[in-house]
Structures are given as C-alpha cells and as structure tokens.
C-alpha cells in the first residue's frame, strides 16, 4: 500500500488519533535531570500515556517507580508501568504489583521478559510465572483483592465502613510481535499467544517496532481473523543514526529496511541522518494509520525531538508544539 501523499491524508480531520511514548529509567543523576525535561516536552503534546520500562530481574524497580511517580505527580499524563515475569516468585510478583498500585499506578504492560545475560536455554529464568498471560491474570487478581478491602466512610450511626459500589479497574497491555517472537516455534504461535493474553484480561496490545507497514497490517489482519478484538497499537521508532538501526536489528531480528539503511549509511551528517530517520518514520506512520491502526506508540530512547518531529510530520500535533521550542526545566 503506498503511503499518503501528504500528512493526514485519508485520516478523518475530526478524528483524534491517540499516541503514546516509551521511556526507560535513567542510569545516573545527570540522565535523570535530562529525563525530567524530556517528560515535560512529551507531556505537553497530550499523549494518552507514557510507559516506563522495567529492567531484567527487577534491576530498575526503584528508578522505574520514581519515573512513574514523576509522570503521575508532575504531569497530567497517565503513566504505564512495564512488568516482567523474569525471576519472580508468586509472592514477589504479588508484592510488586501491590507496590505499584499503592503508588497510584493502575496501567501496566505485562511482559514475559527476556532471559538475563548468560542464562541457559529453557524457561528456568522465568520464576513462578511462566507467561505474560499469567502475569495479566495476577495483576487483575491483586487489584480485585485489594479493592475488596477498600471502604468508604459510612453515614450510619455505627460509623462502620461500606464497600464501594464501583471499583477502580486496571488497564493491562501486552506485547505483540508482527514478525514473530524470537523464541516462537511456529508461524501462528504469536497469534495464539496474543489471543490467550486477551482471554486472560489484556485490554490493549503494543507491538514490537517494525520498519515495513505490511508487516503490521498483515499481522493485524491475521489476529482479527483468529478472534483478537483488542486494539493493537503499532510501535514505531525513528532510526536517526546507522548505529542505532544496526543495534535494533541485532536485538530484534527485524527485517532490514534496505532504503532507510542505505541512506543512513551513505550520510556523514548527524543532522541529515536524523532527518532521514524521521522521514521514514513519518511515511511508515501515515501508511499504517491509513490502513486502520488505532494510534501510534513511539519509542523515544529518552529523547523528545525525533518523536515530536514524527508526530508533527504526521499532522497529529500541528500547532501544539515544536521540537525546537525552548526547553522547560523541571526537577524533583
């Protein structure tokens, strides 16, 4: 399918196309201060949510929670916490979910998780939870149990509590893999896995990044035919340098975008490389939106300029912000 000729073509002008961002926890104090500014820049354009990754074996639990709290307390954006199955007992996973809920975090991305570096083949690294579907169920169960003990002030003479008539619900996202998970053993396994996650209570899926529109659109068609009904958000990353592109291809095993790769490697200018990567991401985003994508989920690498340029190029934030606008400094 050819990409639309201009930003927003084939997108209804009255439609509000949702978008969201992914961040990772800062690795040091200097990176943290830069991240607070990035969050403010991203929050200013009104994303549906900002997700924060979670390190293997809980290695970034404290810093992840700090970033999530900052988003919740210092912006009007909904924070979404990544959680993984790796290395957790049922007790530890239950405690972790409660800790995030107690901090006011009610949206999660439930992930099976990658094995720690140096781990042997097999699933021994997972702990008690063997799949993302089990983690989805656990999150809903913990929230349900937690809500049962929530009480409202009673107007009765006894002064006792009353169970609320409504309970706060959690939103649980899951991952989807348009080109197959690296550990998938058959072609339709990823569709079956996504369907199982939906049955377990997932409310939305977010795809691993991809570089070819037909990969996403074909995957969605197959998923719908199999009975998947939840929204499937496409994950898009502007590859603004050849080194970043090569690293992503190495980590994900995604199919190489030949024209993008050729142009990035042919340029010695960092500014030109950034423009090339943004141009590709804009074209990709327009094509998948025209094909029915319910929104965009942008991988930021903790930098705001490229992803805001993509949204501007697609026509989703025109007049709201500019990547070149003065930085708003914020600290915690």
Image (tube, helix red, strand yellow):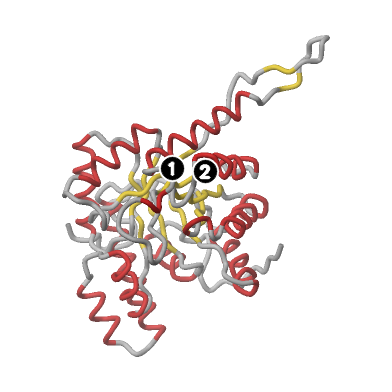
Q: Is residue 27 above or below residue 53?
A: below
**Residue 229 image position (x, y, % from top left):** 30, 35
Q: Nearer the viewer, residue 329 or 255?
A: 255
Residue at the image position 33 percent from the left and 66 percent from the top? 281
Question: Which one is in front, 119 or 2?
Answer: 119
**Is mark 2 in CB contact (under 8 Å) with mark 1?**
yes
Image point (52%, 50%), residue name: 81
Q: Quadrant of residue 30?
A: bottom right
Quarter placement of the N terminus: bottom left
Mark 1 crowdedness (10 Å alpha carbons): few <14, some 14-19, many ≥20: some
- Local packing at callout 2 (Cα closer than 10 Å; few below 14, some 14-19, many 20+) is many
Of all residues, the one furthest to the bottom in this rendering is 268
Specify the quadrant of the image occupied by residue 62. bottom right
Secondary structure of the residue carrying tag 2 is helix
Q: Position of residue 117 (x, y in %)?
A: 40, 66
Q: Where is residue 311 shown, x and y percent of the image?
A: 42, 61
Q: Earlier in the sequence, mark 2 or mark 1?
A: 2
Marker disc for residue 128: 1
Q: Position of residue 58 (x, y in %)?
A: 53, 55
**Residue 299: which quarter of the image?**
bottom left
Query: At 62% across and 68% down in the image, what residue appears?
Result: 32
| Label disc, if present, on residue 285 of the rendered structure | none
Residue 93 shows which numbered tag? 2
Q: Is residue 312 above or below residue 187?
A: below
Where does the C terminus fall, quadrant-wise? bottom right
Report the side of 143 relative to 258 (left or right).
Answer: right
């Amino acid at each position: 399918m050819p990409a639309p000729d201009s930003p927003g073509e084939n997108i209804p002008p009255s439609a509000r196309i949702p978008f969201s961002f992914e961040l990772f926890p800062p690795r040091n104090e200097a990176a943290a201060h830069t991240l607070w500014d990035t969050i403010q820049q991203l929050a200013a354009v009104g994303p549906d949510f900002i997700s924060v990754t979670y390190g293997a074996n809980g290695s970034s639990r404290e810093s992840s929670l700090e970033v999530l709290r900052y988003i919740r307390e210092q912006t009007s954006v909904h924070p979404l916490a990544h959680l993984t199955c790796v290395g957790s007992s049922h007790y530890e996973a239950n405690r972790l979910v409660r800790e995030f809920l107690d901090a006011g975090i009610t949206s999660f991305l439930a992930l099976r998780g990658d094995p720690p570096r140096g781990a042997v083949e097999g699933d021994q690294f997972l702990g008690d939870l063997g799949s993302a579907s089990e983690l989805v169920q656990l999150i809903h169960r913990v929230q349900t149990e937690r809500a049962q003990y929530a009480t409202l002030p009673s107007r009765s003479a006894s002064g006792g509590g009353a169970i609320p008539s409504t309970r706060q619900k959690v939103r649980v996202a899951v991952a989807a893999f348009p080109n197959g998970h690296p550990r998938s053993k058959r072609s339709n396994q990823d569709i079956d896995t996504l369907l199982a996650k939906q049955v377990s209570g997932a409310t939305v899926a977010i795809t691993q990044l991809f570089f070819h529109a037909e990969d996403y659109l074909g995957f969605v068609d197959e998923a719908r035919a199999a009975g998947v009904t939840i929204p499937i958000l496409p994950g898009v990353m502007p590859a603004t340098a050849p080194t970043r592109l090569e690293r992503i291809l190495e980590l994900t095993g995604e199919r190489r975008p030949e024209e993008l790769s050729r142009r990035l490697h042919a340029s010695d200018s960092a500014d030109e490389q950034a423009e090339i990567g943004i141009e590709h991401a804009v074209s990709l985003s327009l094509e998948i939106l025209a094909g029915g994508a319910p929104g965009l989920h942008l991988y930021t690498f903790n930098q705001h300029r490229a992803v805001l340029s993509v949204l501007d190029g697609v026509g989703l934030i025109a007049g709201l912000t500019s990547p070149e606008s003065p930085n708003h400094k914020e600290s915690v």
